[in-house]
Amino acid sequence: MTPNSSSPDFVVALDFGGTKLDVATATLDGRLIASERLQTDADGGAHQAVERALECARSLGDAATAATGGRLVAAAASSPGIVLDDRILLAPNVPGWTELPLAARLREGLDLATVVTETDVKAAALAESRWGALRGADPGVFLSLGTGIAAGIVVGGRVLHGANGAAGEIGYALRGVHDDAGAANGRAPLEEYAGGRAIGERGSRLLGRPVSAADLFTRAETDLDARMLVDETLAELAVHVANLAVLVDPARIAVGGGLMNSSTLILAALRRRVRQAVPFPPEVVAAQFVHDAPLRGAIALAIDASRHAGVPAPAAIAPEATA
């Protein structure tokens, strides 16, 4: 555990997901003060999700001030999609989310000038690079396997954004020459095959009853049909991960996201293909922050933003080592 910061000031971090909202306060050395998880209620639209998150953030901020005597100096939020100043691209799961000027709403709702935003997987990659399984890996890749599929690439301690903020959006990768519909058609071929929602839908058709991806991975231990579908999916996913490793030549790949509840199967498939296909095979490991990496990344972003705003730095920056 890192010694307490000499400053009682703190930051607020928010992670907006398709099904959940995570909100936390943290010290300027990255230690969580308090956190809370809410349901997104995506069918209710973007406005209510942001307002409930802001209400929670204000409540946690008031509690932190009462407990520490410090003040809120910066906030950061992570979100699906590519977060721009006036809208969010490639984020179709919450109605109204793409038209949301997220940073402006947070500045207004928190009455705070220093607010930054980031794509959730890129925020997660920053957390893993600074405090987690990618620490010391250069380059490092964070691979998120959940409802969606994406990667965050870290070079020299900085997350690669690309010309349009879309670096690492591998869910849009074509699966082969048979794919004649892609991003221009609103399609994400790899994600539509190997993402968690797609796995559940394919499994439901195969088994003749509704199942989730998690159900299917569990059934794969005893059900041959389920195991065949899981193995086929992981085999294809592993090819894309190996190709990414050939392109980037990372020192380490850290895998996180909801599908990592079945980490043994997933890591074995990825490691096997990477060893076979990549000239200099990187380590393939489980992410440290399996359940809250984007929130941890938002904490890191808020701390960095507070530095740029002139808030004095504590002696050390490192959160507790638990996920």
Image (tube, helix red, strand yellow):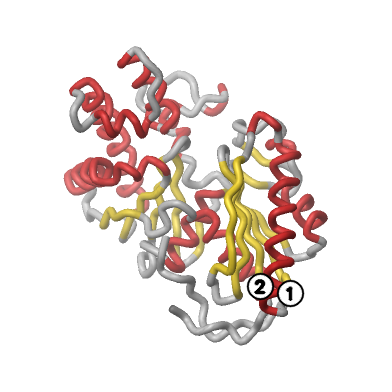
Q: Tell me where residue 190 sits by quadrant.
A: top left
Count of numbered tags: 2
Work out whether residue 94 or residue 220 is closer to the camera in this orientation and state it: 220
* Residue indicated by mark 2: 10
Instruction: Label 2: state its secondary structure.
Output: strand
Among the 4 quarters of the image, the one containing residue 25: bottom right
Q: Amino acid at mark 1?
A: Arg
Above/below status of 237 relative to 2: above
Check disc 2 and give the amino acid type. Phe
- Residue 294, image x, y percentages: 52, 54
Residues tagged 2 and 1 counted as in contact (Cβ below 8 A): yes
Quadrant the N terminus occupies: bottom left
Location of residue 250 in the rendering, given as x and y in whole percent from the top left corner: 33, 57
Describe residue 216's horizontal placement relative to residue 44 as left or right: left
Among the two numbered marks 2 and 1 on one chain, the one whose residue lies closer to the N terminus: 2
Q: Residue 260, how many percent across, how many down? A: 35, 45
40 relative to 1 in the view: left or right: right
Can you give x and y, in whole percent of width and height, for residue 320 in the image? 45, 71
Q: Which residue is mark 1?
A: 71
What distance separates the C-alpha of mark 2 from that of mark 1?
Answer: 6 Å
* Point 72% across, 70% down: residue: 72
Query: From this viewpoint, is residue 118 visible?
Result: no
- Taking 62 as reference, is 22 left or right? left
Residue 71 lies in what quarter of the image? Answer: bottom right
Q: Residue at x 79, y 64 (%)?
A: 113
**Compared with residue 153, is residue 5 higher up or lower down, i.e. above or below?**
below
267 or 30: nearer the viewer? 30
* Label 2 crowd bin: few (<14), some (14–19), many (20+), radius 10 Å: many
| Mark 1 neighbour density, 10 Å: few (under 14) some (14–19) many (20 or more) | some
